[in-house]
Image (tube, rainbow, N blue to C red):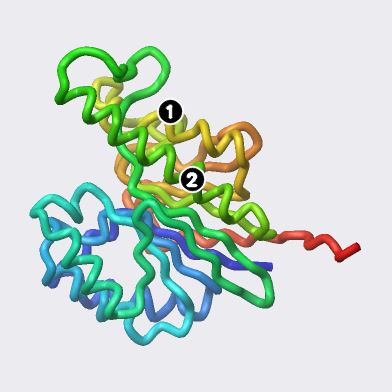
């Protein structure tokens, strides 16, 4: 059994230092892997990233993360990645990684995701160049998910880690008028085509915890939704014996 601790929108800041230090120290004894679903910082300041880095620096279990919209707000996303990488976190930006846990290869596909909406209210690849650039940006995120899932197809356990939502179900509770800006159904297409075991995201603070893409469970692990520092998922995977 692999225990995965997940949280989104931790919004690290100096004011939250004590709480973060305590929560990460506790989770080390409750999980084999930590996944952070973006909005790692409160406003995208490098100093805020330092707080999260200090909370994770001494952990003996791996931590993988993606960026969220807060983390790029000030234009310091690259410095935040450097800061957190120096502290031992693995930042995935349209990338995939494979880590070994209890002798099992776990494939993690990580990217921020982006906007575009869901059935009944979707952005199309037509019209003003500025809006078409938004559409293209989401397209690059979709391509990264597909490429990553193909690359980790050999792993007995596969996880997709996002910030923006790939399904509307985990947005239930958010105003309908802003759901186009909280995710995109286009993100779900490669997940449906190459099903992982679990999809995690954040961003929608007033959303809902659970949705699905086919048979794949999707969870909104924003701490505002879960009411917990971390949600822990226990995953059992049967490994086929070699023939």
From this view, report whether residue 111 is shown above or below residue 65. above
**Residue shown at the point (51%, 40%) measured from the top left:** 210
Image marks 1 and 2: residues in contact by CB distance under 8 Å: no
Give 186 or 128, whichever is nearer the viewer: 128
Q: Nearer the N terminus, badge 1 or badge 2?
A: 1
- In percent of width and height, residue 21 lies at 29, 78
Q: Secondary structure at mark 2?
A: strand
Query: Is 44 situated left or right of 240 in this image?
Result: left
How crowded pointer 2 is (Cα within 10 Å; few <14, some 14-19, many 20+) is rated as many
Query: Is 145 situated left or right of 100 in this image?
Result: left
| Label ID, residue 123 | none
From this view, report whether residue 21 is shown above or below residue 114. below
* Residue projecting furthest to the left: 74
The C terminus sits in image quarter: bottom right
How crowded pointer 1 is (Cα within 10 Å; few <14, some 14-19, many 20+) is rated as some
Give 17 or 136, whichever is nearer the viewer: 136
- Disc 1 designates what residue? 185
* Residue projecting furthest to the right: 243
- In percent of width and height, residue 17 lies at 20, 75
Query: Is 32 situated left or right of 208 in this image?
Result: right
């Amino acid at each position: 059994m692999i225990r995965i601790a997940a949280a989104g929108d931790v919004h690290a800041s100096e004011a939250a230092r004590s709480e973060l230090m305590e929560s990460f120290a506790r989770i080390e004894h409750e999980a084999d892997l930590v996944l952070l679903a973006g909005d790692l910082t409160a406003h995208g300041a490098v100093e805020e990233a330092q707080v999260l880095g200090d909370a994770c620096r001494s952990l003996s279990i791996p931590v993988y993360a993606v960026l969220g919209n807060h983390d790029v707000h000030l234009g310091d996303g690259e410095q935040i990645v450097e800061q957190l990488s120096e502290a031992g976190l693995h930042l995935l930006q349209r990338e995939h990684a494979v880590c070994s846990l209890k002798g099992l290869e776990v494939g993690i596909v990580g990217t921020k995701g982006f906007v575009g909406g869901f059935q009944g209210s979707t952005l199309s690849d037509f019209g003003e160049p500025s809006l078409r650039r938004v559409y293209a940006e989401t397209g690059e995120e979709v391509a990264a998910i597909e490429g990553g899932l193909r690359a980790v197809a050999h792993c007995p356990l596969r996880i997709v880690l996002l910030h923006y939502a790939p399904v509307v179900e985990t947005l239930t509770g958010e105003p309908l008028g802003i759901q186009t800006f909280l995710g995109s159904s286009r993100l779900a297409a490669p997940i449906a085509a190459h099903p992982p075991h679990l999809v995690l995201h954040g961003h929608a603070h007033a959303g809902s915890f659970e949705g699905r893409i086919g048979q794949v469970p999707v969870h909104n692990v924003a701490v505002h939704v879960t009411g917990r520092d971390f949600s822990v998922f226990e995953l059992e995977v049967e490994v086929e014996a070699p023939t």
